[in-house]
């Protein structure tokens, strides 16, 4: 599966086959490839993954590239607390 988004984000996901191969994520863009390390590490861990889990890790990997706050960021937590009140 190929994914394309602005600003210049592109990557692909190879899905596992019946031979037991795992998911694989890659990008032809060197900028994107640097950010995919988190997702690649997650995929290479021992447990089986679902496609939505892989895509969530890719999204989390790309958060800095997209200019989004990290979910663990203090500012994000403060914003979340304000919304809940």
Image (cartoon, helix red, strand yellow):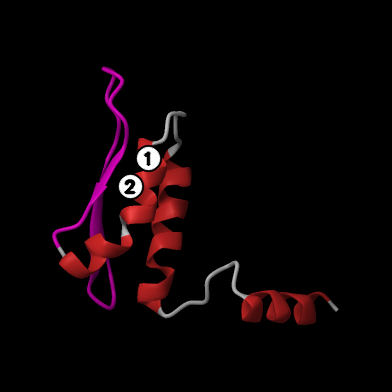
Q: Is residue 75 left or right of residue 44?
A: right
Residue farthest toward the left in the current orientation of the protein: 28
Viewport quadrant of the C terminus: bottom right
> Measuring 24% from the left and 57% from the top, which residue is drawn there?
11
Q: For the residue carrying disc 2, how many other residues have a C-alpha within 10 Å: few (<14), some (14-19), or many (20+)?
A: some
Can residue 2 be seen?
no
Q: Magenta segment: does it hold 14?
A: yes
Name the disc covering residue 55, or none. none
Residue tagged 1 = 43
> Measuring 37% from the left and 40% from the top, which residue is drawn there?
43
Location of residue 32 in the rendering, given as x and y in whole percent from the top left corner: 25, 65
Residue tagged 2 = 40
Location of residue 38 in the rendering, given as x and y in whole percent from the top left corner: 39, 54
Residue farthest toward the top in the current orientation of the protein: 19
Q: Magenta segment: does it hold 3?
A: yes
Location of residue 42 in the rendering, given as x and y in whole percent from the top left corner: 41, 44
Task: Look at the picture and state if 78 lies above or below 41.
Answer: below
Circles 2 and 1 in contact, beta carbons < 8 Å = yes
Label 1 secondary element: helix
The magenta segment? 1-28
> Measuring 27% from the left and 78% from the top, which residue is drawn there?
7
Label 2 secondary element: helix
> Measuring 47% from the left and 29% from the top, which residue is drawn there?
47
Which quadrant of the view contains residue 75? bottom right
Q: For the residue carrying disc 1, how many other residues have a C-alpha within 10 Å: few (<14), some (14-19), or many (20+)?
A: many
Q: Relative to the observer, which residue lies in front, 38 or 15?
A: 38
């Amino acid at each position: 599966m190929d994914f394309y988004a602005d600003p210049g984000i592109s990557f692909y996901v190879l899905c596992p086959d019946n031979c037991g191969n795992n998911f694989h994520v890659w990008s032809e863009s060197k900028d994107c490839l640097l950010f995919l390390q988190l997702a690649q590490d997650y995929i290479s861990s021992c447990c089986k993954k679902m496609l939505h889990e892989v895509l969530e890790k890719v999204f989390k990997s790309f958060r800095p590239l997209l200019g989004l706050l990290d979910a663990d960021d203090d500012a994000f937590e403060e914003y979340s607390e304000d919304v809940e009140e």
